[in-house]
Image: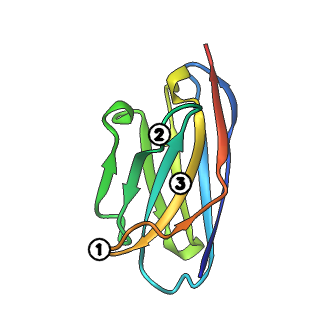
Amino acid sequence: QVQLVESGGGLVQAGGSLRLSCVASGRTSSTYAMGWFRQAPGKERESVAAISWSGGSTYYLDSVKGRFTISRDNAKNTVYLQMNSLKPEDTAVYYCAARKAGGTYEYWGQGTQVTVSS
């Protein structure tokens, strides 16, 4: 089992920045790819960014490319999402998730609210 805890959400004005963190505990000896997802009210959950175990491979949703950066520190069992130039449409609950290579996301955090005011 892997437990994930997100932090760093909050209220920010458009154009501002936030850094989300996700700390993993439990069976962290396995190599997990990590992802950030978000879900806005009335909308489906979407994948925002993902990173491989080594950090050598990343993915970004088109609408966040150039503004968000995903990174990880395996020594700290932590994955980050640096969000710059935030827009009101980025408002959502952000979740981190973990999956084994080639698998589906099986572990999820509780989510952290990000609200961007115009």
Q: Amino acid at mark 2?
A: Glu
Where residue 82 appears, x then y in whole percent?
Answer: 51, 43
1 vs 3, front mark: 1
Between 107 and 5, the one lying in front of the other is 107
Badge 1 or badge 3: first in the primary sequence: 3
Of circles 2 and 1, the one toward us is: 2
The residue type indicated by label 3 comes to Tyr
Q: Earlier in the sequence, mark 3 or mark 2?
A: 2
Q: Are marks 1 and 3 in contact (CB under 8 Å)?
A: no
- Residue at 39 percent across and 34 percent down: it is 64
Looking at the rendered structure, the number of numbered marks drawn on it comes to 3
Q: Which residue is mark 1?
A: 102
Helix, strand or loop at label 3? It is strand
Query: Distance between the Cα atoms at labels 3 and 2?
Result: 22 Å
Residue receiving disc 2? 44
Protein image colouring: rainbow
Q: Is 86 displayed left or right of 115 in the figure? A: left
Q: Classify residue 114 as left or right of residue 45.
A: right
Tell me the number on the disc at residue 80: 3
State the separation of the CA atoms marked 1 and 3.
22 Å
Dot 2 crowding, Cα within 10 Å, few <14, some 14–19, many 20+: few
Give the SS element for disc 1.
loop
Please determine whether, in this image, residue 71 is positioned above or below residue 53: above
Q: Quadrant of residue 102?
A: bottom left
Residue at the front extreme of this rendering: 42
The residue located at (59%, 32%) in the rendering is 41
Which quarter of the figure is the C terminus placed in?
A: top right
**Contact, CB < 8 Å: mark 2 with mark 1?**
no
Q: Residue at x 57, y 52 (%)?
A: 95
